Image: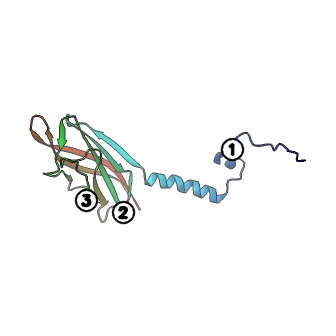
Amino acid sequence: MFTTKKISTLSKRPSCLDFARHGTLTMVGLVLLISFFSFTSLIASDKKTLTANNHVKVEIHSPAHIPLTKNGILKFFLTPNDGIHINTEPMFELTLDKSSNFELAGNPRFSKNEKGYLDFTKPIEYTVKAKNGVQPGKHSLKATLYYFYCSDQEGWCNRFSQPVDLTITVTR
């Protein structure tokens, strides 16, 4: 016949802080913990919503950090009001200020809907990188996003100039 013995268990799982308090957190564990938080800060992004245009809301997702030797992606989500669309021809354009420490790399990426207008469920993506000679630190990225928005019912179109002012940290 078999007998069962009750095995006592911990009332809660130990956390990293419990190990640190009891001196059992290994150096490897500490390095892994620090590495995790460093990695999450590299992939972090900042989000900014601009409402200067009464017909189109612009949300910008920008990288919080861009390494000197890497590119970063600026994502522009343009959300028009009902009855408004964003033209892809003439195409939108991002112009960086001449004093900017960043430059564009390549052409914008975007999707069109079935009518050939901007698919506003997906972002317009611009690749940016730090210019040669830029030192690590916080830098301002000032630019203007130009785009045409049109009324579906009334047939009018307007060109809008959306100022963009972001702070991005350039890292080694």
- Report crowding for label 3: few under 14, some 14 to 19, many 20 or more residues within 10 A (C-alpha): some
Of 92 and 47, the residue lying toward us = 92
Residue 40: x and y, percent?
Answer: 48, 52
Q: Residue furthest left?
A: 155
Residue 22: x and y, percent?
Answer: 72, 48
**Which-is-in-front pick, marks 2 and 1?**
1
Q: Which mark is residue 59?
A: none
* Amino acid type at image mark 1: Arg
Would you name the residue on which mark 3 appears? 104
Q: Is 60 placed left or right of 67 in the picture?
A: left
* Amino acid type at image mark 3: Leu
Position above or below: 94 against 52: below
Q: Name the N-terminal-most of marks 3 and 1.
A: 1
- Between the C-alphas of marks 3 and 1, the distance is 49 Å
Dividing the picture into quadrants, the one containing residue 98 is bottom left
Q: Residue furthest right?
A: 1
Would you name the residue on which mark 1 appears? 13
Residue 7: x and y, percent?
Answer: 81, 44
Q: Secondary structure at mark 3?
A: strand
